[in-house]
Image (cartoon, helix red, strand yellow):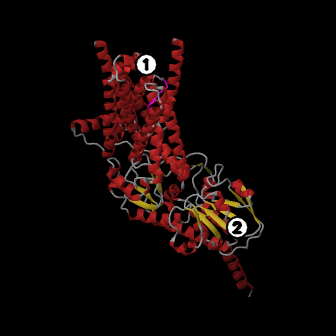
Amino acid sequence: MLLPRFVTLFAGLGFCSLVCAAPTEYPLTVENCGATLTFPHAPARTVTIGQAGTEMLFALGLGDKLAGTSLWFNDVLDKYKGQNDKIERLADNEPSFESVIGKRPELVAVELEWMVGPQGAVATREQFHELGIATYLMPSDCESKDNLVGADGTRLAPFRVQSIYKSITELARIFDVQARGQQLNAQLKASLARSVAAVQDKNHTSALVWFSSASLDIDPYVAGHKGIPDFMLKTLGVRNVVQSDEEWPTVGWETIAKANPTFLVIARMDRRRFPADDYQKKLAFLHSDPVTRNMDAVKNNRIIILDAMAMQASLRMFDGLQSLAMAINSYDLPK
Amino acid sequence: MTAALIRTLLALVALLLSVVAGVAIGETSIEPGVVLQVLANKLWNAGYVLDPIDEGIVWNYRLTRALVAGACGAGLATCGVILQSLLRNPLADPYLLGISAGASTGAVLVALLGIGAGAISMSVGAFAGAVAAFAVVVLLGRASGVPGSTGQIILAGIAGSQLFNALTAFLITKSASSEQARGIMFWLLGNLSGVRWPSVWLAVPAAMAGLAVCLWHRRALDAFTFGTDSAASLGIAVRRVQFLLISCAALVTAVMVSIVGSIGFVGLVIPHAARLLLGTGHTRLLPASALGGAVFLIAADVLSRTLIKGQVIPVGVITALVGAPVFALILIGRRNAR
């Protein structure tokens, strides 16, 4: 008589530790990138600086808590378009300090540290905190990363995917939607595992990730060996041919051509600052330059076009991993 | 005469050697034998079977880079000689006339505001900006100048540079994110990585033409070193020659800036070094400066690619690192010679 009850109880507990979680107790204190944040209650109004954070909050079902968004790289994901249309877009790029505080937010969620770092492009964190506005920085951009060195910061240790799970867990706690957070993390982990499984038999490949170039012929901006694109390659068993700690170093085409990677990944983005932002121009360059057109990857057309947002610490990175895995799987490579 | 011939030959050999060094030494290592085979293939159809990537790197990346570096070095040094002689100011350099400031403004206009809707490259924008800035400087110099006075154009150049630098800063603050500005600054600091054959066909003739025009007027340049009055008394059409040579220097510099950005110190230091070695006669000073500039910039570019492995240092940093101490030595040497 007693046994089934125990089983039910245990099953219930086990199930609960996976899916449900105790509600958040306020006031809540969170340690975030060198600052201690205190929340007297779940923030009712949030402004985001960075598309990754914006879409993460949508995924957590918190669209109604958003008062403003900014720093967009691409169009919002289709499934969030309806919600997003109702929220004011403060700026396409970085917003001004006053436009952010004008929304009277209780939380500002920031994707990239240099937006609110010591030389804050928007303002410093202290300026927000003095006004009683909490700033949540994505751990993916501050943990083991020095954002004062190198053009886009320099990673002191390789990027860890755990930092994305951590931001989801923490945001879920701040907003008291922990069950949703756990569910989302479980989905992402499963997605990552599927991608890894898809390329299990493809080994000893190497790749270069080309983001853009200031001018088409000039040394390109490519993914360094500790950043997010490198994590994606590593996860799929691919070696990055670039050996720089910088997030997006410039490397000469001579060095790249001699490294002769198995395939190339080029970024697709809506940004049009440089001609090379257009992936069609990147393709045309690769096929016409007298050196790059002789690279194995170009000759065999092993060029993967990947969304630039998928190369950032965002939910889209997991979709990016899947498309990478599918592309790699489709190549007939020597084992 | 024979001594001069030997010197000329030695100088040409030095130039050839530096080009070969520029081709043989790069970011990655390619066997010297392979490098020579590539050159033999391309120049004499020798028909060696080679890796097309190696071949492309040597012929399309490294050789073009060495040739453009040489042409830029020669062009900038020639312009330096002209301006220092004409303006009788030892601190005159090719960027004195507002050219690099104008080039940045032009490049920024194209890159940030999308002027030309993608049909105009940053280089074309830089060239247009450089010419525009020069025009402003000349007009200002004319409007304010006592005829034949050289001080005015220097002041006009400084004013023009300030104006265009301010304009660039304004445009960047107004419309660029820091990331964008970074790309543009990187390019303006002097960068030879985007050089291919079309740049060679632009830079080499420009440098040659500039040198030819100056050599044509070498007697006039000699006369100008004693001042405009003496030049006039020798029957030189002072204003016409001044205008022609300064415009020539401006155009050559504008071409170079639009291809590789503004590389400092070459145009300032090389003419002084050549003057110390060979005296002030322009018959020798001009070719010597051109050759010196060419060799110096090719060597600086080789250093910029090899000093830190796997990373390219902006060539302007190298020229300044080498140029500044050399310049200091020249200054100290001058004081001691007095």
3D distance between C-alphas at marks 1 and 2:
78 Å
- Specify whether disc 1 shares its chain with disc 2: no
* In-front residue for pair A122/B59: A122
Which picture quadrant has residue B200? top left
Q: Which residues are magenta?
A: B90-94
Q: Amino acid at mark 2?
A: Ile
In the picture, the disc for residue B227 is 1
In the picture, the disc for residue B133 is none
Which picture quadrant has residue B37? top left
Main SS of the magenta part reads loop
Callout 1 touching callout 2 (CB < 8 Å): no
Q: Which secondary structure lies at badge 1?
A: loop
B63 sits to left or right of B44: right
Location of the N terminus of chain B by quadrant is top left
Against A117, residue B70 (above or below) is above
Asked if the magenta segment contains residue B113, the reply would be no
* In-front residue for pair A162/B286: B286
In the picture, the disc for residue A174 is 2
A209 sits to left or right of A299: right
Residue B118 is situated, as x and y percent measured from the top left of the image, at 39, 54
